[in-house]
Amino acid sequence: MRVFAGYITVISFMLIFFTTLFFATDEWNKVQSFQQELEHAVSADTVDLNRTSLLLDKDGRVFSEVNRPYRLYVPDEKIPPFLKDILVASEDQHFYEHVGFDAGAILRAVVKNLVFTHIQQGGSTITQQLARNLYLGQEKTYNRKLTELFYAHEIEQTLSKDEILELYMNVIYFSNGVYGIETASQYYFQKSVAELNQAEMAFIASIPNNPGKYDPVDHFDQTKVRQERLLDILVSTQKLSKDEAEKLKKVPISLNVRKKTDLYPDYAFYVENELKELIARNEGYVLDMANASSPEEKKKIGEKLDDRYQEVISSGVRIQTALNPAIQKKSISALNAQLNMELQGATVTIDNKTRTIVALSGGRNYKKYNFNHAFQAFRQPGSAIKPLLVYGPYIEKFKAGINDKVNANQYCVGEYCPINYGGAQPGTVTLQQSMAQSYNGSAVRLMEKVGVEKAFQFIAPFSFEKVIKEDKTYAASIGGFTYGMSPLELTDAYTSFIDGNYQASHAILHVKDNNGKILYQWKNEPKKVWSADTTSKIRKMLNEGAKTGTGRAAYVSRPYVGIKTGTTNNYHDYWVMGLNDTLTTGVWVGHDIPRDMSGIEQQRPSHKIWKSIME
């Protein structure tokens, strides 16, 4: 009888609805295709919930959340039956009987609403609420309520009752920006929904009926009253005995409200940027941009990539990273301790074995989404480039030994005449002494012997985004570049001195969907850059630089340590690059608008930061 009455009611509403559309919009042709559009809109394939993506550290712990609202999805089989019973009893007792709408509830709502000038009560079923949340929004008009009936009926034709209930329990609002039953469980109790006791289940099931009134944080007592009322409803529907309900009412409810997890914002921001790059490479956007015929086409491809990135982030992926929280904390602490209110800086640390980025600090007292100096600041590298662009290529080409001699006095090529630090004229020194003391005269001489083009061929495998053809001059031998490198790029290049191979370093290990399927992971193959002989010699020279050269203020006692420093013209930048037996770390210190830092040179801030991270 209820179903029959429901059909009579909906047919009546259909006549009203179509008549309203016809006379109000004069678009009867759209009404004729309404059912086809509805079938297309309401499909299992089109259900796309906006979910929270999680960033995980090396041990699988969440350290950051991406995307709002906060929603963690839980499948039907992981939702306790008791929780389903109590929500059905609370929100829609005839859920398993109706066809998407409850005729009796609708008629009661119509009678009540006749007293008012606007909608006060909707008589909505779970299916109608799902339609509202998925497709229609929360507008309260008769036209929207009528549309809701059509959507609800179509949902019932498309999905099973279990599927409808699963979706409903993952979309409903639980106050405080929390959506879905699993999210509510994690937010209010810091437990998964399967770990809740029945009293706790009834408590959070009280919220959706009126999320403002039954906000457990601000209105705990009212939520508790609602919980007890729900338990009484379960008794009346014979889902619980009276004794069981009374026992559950006496179970203490202790909230353990979860704060948003947003640790290590500099690393998290980098991961989000790396994810976009990973998507671009895996799905062909990089190739499409390279083949774009015009700036306009390239811009459109970039916009498509942005949309695709948002789609992935909104799907609730789990991004497994290499983050080492201990090293990250140490990096942040070291940076902030050495930088005054005017200075800026950045650090990058890469694991030698895995070639993964385990820590990255983007600036003093870094706030998420601010300019990140670790990967967004491009600065001239100073003498930190010499092992990569001068000494490595020279030893590789001429099979030179570290004790071979070179003149380190000032040297001019044409009108280019760089001077050594302090105007020193050391005469003939070994290659090892030359690099340890960072003499500019010998660096220019060695590049001249190698040849500028040949020297630049050796740094071509590295990820130097802004090295351009105009940089191919002798000035590059001591760090004179148009744009330069980011701290991440330079640190990444130094990993080639681990074993002679270069493999681009990344923070992301893999990205999985909600079902645990791997969607993305890097597939970089190592490239041979230096021979074993060259690698061994450069490592010895870097070690000498750490012990007796310009890096000695950063020296740490480890099985191996190698350091190269860099200072740019007018003391605009301080660099310390190097590696120990397990890690490769780069440090940059400077100002956003370059200026003379000679006054703090003797304080060695970059050396102290590097040492704090690596010892």
Image (spheres, helix red, strand yellow):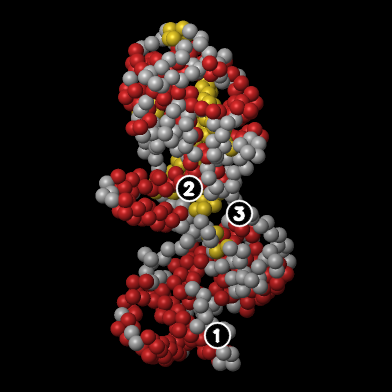
Q: Where 402 falls versus 10 (above or below)?
A: above
Q: Position of residue 8 (x, y in %)?
A: 42, 91
Please state the total of marks drawn on the protein image: 3
* 536 or 459, nearer to the observer: 459
Residue appearing at x 46%, y 57% in the figure = 314
Q: Is residue 224 visible?
A: no
**Label 3 secondary element:** loop
Say whether disc 1 or disc 3 marks the residue closer to the N-terminus: 1
- Residue pointed to by mark 3: 260
* 95 or 529, nearer to the observer: 529
How much space separates mark 1 and mark 2, taking CA atoms? 44 Å
Looking at the rendered structure, the kind of residue marked 1 is Ile
The C terminus sits in image quarter = top right
Say whether disc 1 or disc 2 marks the residue closer to the N-terminus: 1
How much space separates mark 3 and mark 2, taking CA atoms? 17 Å
Looking at the rendered structure, the kind of residue marked 3 is Lys
Q: Is residue 286 left or right of residue 78?
A: left
Q: Are marks 3 and 2 in contact (CB under 8 Å)?
A: no
* 206 or 372, nearer to the observer: 372
Residue appearing at x 58%, y 40% in the figure = 363
Q: Within the image, what quadrant is residue 118 found in?
A: bottom right
**Label 2 secondary element:** helix
Q: Position of residue 178 (x, y in %)?
A: 58, 62
* 127 or 2, nearer to the observer: 127
Residue appearing at x 53%, y 49% in the figure = 369
Q: Are marks 1 and 2 in contact (CB under 8 Å)?
A: no
- Residue pointed to by mark 2: 272
**Label 1 secondary element:** loop
- Residue pointed to by mark 1: 119
Q: Where 272 falls versus 228 (above or below)?
A: above
